[in-house]
Image (cartoon, rainbow, N blue to C red):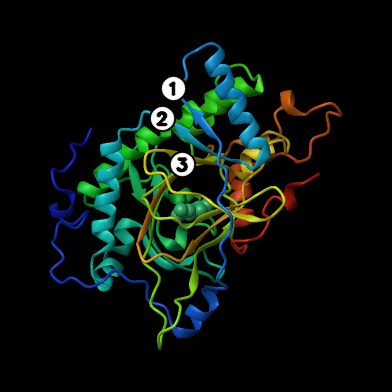
């Protein structure tokens, strides 16, 4: 266990044990053409009506109702809010504050630290997707630790790189941020497992196989911390444009568990394709159904398309845990969920195969279609 720093903003800089000496505004450096590429027409999507699932509902009718609400939410939009989650608020806040302190480093120092911390900015994946974003990307090791995922070894979408899983943490100096993110990851992984247990109950699946997919020693999980700086002022006055923070996509894993500070920006695509804004909630977590869960449920659950639009004068910091299965895990619709006709909509594949297949795709592409029967 790691102790929380008394004052995160005055703790030594994470990993590298040095204090940032100069203070520049945190920024994402984009060329003019790149800025034009990520500009979005002003839009004000309606606010999403996000269902809430109380993970602490007591066994009996209340828990059964929570399981039903969870399944209904996964079928409808593939997205819900979790309360009663058991992750200590002070741990989440301290991890977030420590990450924000790192993002406030001068740009050159962050670039220098990039290989040690899994830092990247503006480029998401290897296929040219850009965003008004900087991030830390950490693979979760079998021992529960977190190791940086370098850009070159990460896949197009946030998947833990194979190289990160099981690799040693000894080459990267430890520090307060690293320790806090590890502790946070342990707590959120536990919650992801509890969500999957409740889901299995709602689906009438026996045993803990679904939850075990993300809790095994060799499960391919990861943590991503995203920072979206405030949108830049418009040149020459006038209204500032909205920018793409994280372009539209679905998450490839089983589930993603997201927490963010109080800044808006996350949008989900509803069943009919229209975008809806997710109101921020610092006390709750949001769960996305990922592509793999859509496959396991034979398309009954919907892998939710989502994006982040930057149109605020405030920074957004979000921390997302991605629960993925072991690399060699064979994935196919669960026999219990094949439905009346018994027809499987997807052919069997391994998680490693799926990741490799998605590696060079653009963020917005449908990565499941090559696996449809
Ligand atoms: O930063 C966010 O709020 C969401 C980002 C996201 O969808 C992702 O990292 O997969
Ligand atoms: Fe995502």
**In which quarter of the view is residue 240 placed?**
bottom left
Position of residue 247 measured from the top left corner of the image (x, y, whole percent): 55, 63
Q: Which residue is mark 3?
A: 221
Please give the count of numbered marks on the rendered protein.
3
The quadrant of the image that shows the C terminus is top right
Position of residue 291 measured from the top left corner of the image (x, y, whole percent): 63, 45
User: What separation in Å lies between label 3 and label 1 (alpha carbons)?
Assistant: 24 Å
Which is closer to the viewer, label 3 or label 2?
A: 2
Residue 198's place in the image compared with 18, above or below, is above
Residue 136's place in the image compared with 303, above or below, is below
Mark 3, ligand 1, within 8 Å: the answer is no
Q: Which residue is mark 2?
A: 85
Along the line of sight, the residue nearer the viewer: 186 or 239: 239
Along the line of sight, the residue nearer the viewer: 248 or 363: 248
Residue 81's place in the image compared with 210, above or below, is below
Residue situated furthest right in the rendering: 341
Q: Which residue is mark 1?
A: 56
**In which quarter of the view is residue 333 placed?**
top right
Q: Is residue 137 visible?
A: no
Helix, strand or loop status at disc 2? loop
> Which comes sooner in the sequence, label 3 or label 1?
1
The residue that appears at 13% across and 54% down in the rendered structure is 10
30 displayed left or right of 116: right
Q: Are marks 3 and 1 in contact (CB under 8 Å)?
A: no
Rate crowding at label 1 as few (under 14), some (14 to 19) or many (20 or more) other CA atoms within 10 Å. Answer: some
Rate crowding at label 3 as few (under 14), some (14 to 19) or many (20 or more) other CA atoms within 10 Å. Answer: many
> Which comes sooner in the sequence, label 3 or label 2?
2
The quadrant of the image that shows the N terminus is top left
Helix, strand or loop status at disc 3? loop
Q: Are marks 1 and 2 in contact (CB under 8 Å)?
A: yes
Position of residue 298 measured from the top left corner of the image (x, y, whole percent): 73, 36
């Amino acid at each position: 266990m790691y102790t929380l720093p008394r004052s995160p903003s005055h703790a030594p800089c994470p990993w590298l044990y040095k204090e940032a000496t100069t203070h520049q505004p945190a920024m994402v450096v984009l060329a003019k053409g790149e800025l034009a590429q990520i500009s979005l027409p002003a839009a004000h999507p309606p606010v999403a009506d996000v269902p809430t699932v109380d993970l602490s509902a007591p066994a009996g009718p209340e828990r059964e109702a929570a399981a039903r609400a969870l399944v209904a939410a996964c079928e409808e939009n593939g997205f819900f809010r979790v309360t009663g989650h058991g992750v200590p608020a002070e741990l989440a806040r301290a991890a977030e504050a420590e990450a924000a302190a790192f993002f406030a480093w001068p740009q050159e120092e962050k670039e220098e630290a990039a290989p040690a911390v899994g830092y990247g900015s503006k480029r998401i994946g290897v296929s040219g997707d850009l965003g008004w974003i900087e991030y830390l990307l950490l693979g979760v090791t079998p021992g529960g630790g977190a190791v940086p995922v370098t850009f070159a070894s990460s896949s197009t979408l946030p998947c833990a790189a194979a190289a990160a899983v099981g690799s040693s943490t000894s080459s990267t100096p430890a520090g307060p941020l690293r320790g806090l993110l590890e502790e946070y990851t342990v707590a959120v992984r536990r919650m992801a497992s509890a969500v999957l247990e409740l889901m299995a109950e709602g689906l009438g699946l026996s045993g803990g196989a679904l939850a075990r997919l993300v809790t095994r020693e060799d499960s391919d999980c990861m943590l991503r911390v995203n920072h979206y700086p405030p949108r830049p002022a418009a040149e020459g006055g006038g209204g500032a444009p909205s920018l793409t923070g994280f372009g539209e996509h679905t998450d490839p894993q089983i589930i993603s568990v997201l927490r963010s500070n109080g800044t808006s920006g996350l949008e989900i695509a509803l069943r009919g394709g229209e975008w809806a804004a997710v109101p921020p909630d610092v006390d709750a977590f949001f769960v996305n159904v990922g592509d793999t869960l859509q496959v396991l449920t034979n398309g009954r659950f919907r892998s939710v398309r989502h994006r982040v639009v930057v149109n605020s004068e405030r920074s957004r910091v979000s921390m997302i845990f991605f629960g993925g299965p072991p690399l060699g895990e064979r994935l196919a619709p669960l026999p219990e969920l094949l439905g009346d006709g018994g027809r499987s909509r997807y052919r069997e594949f391994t998680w490693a195969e799926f990741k490799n297949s998605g590696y060079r795709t653009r963020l917005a592409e449908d990565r499941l279609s090559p696996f449809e029967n």
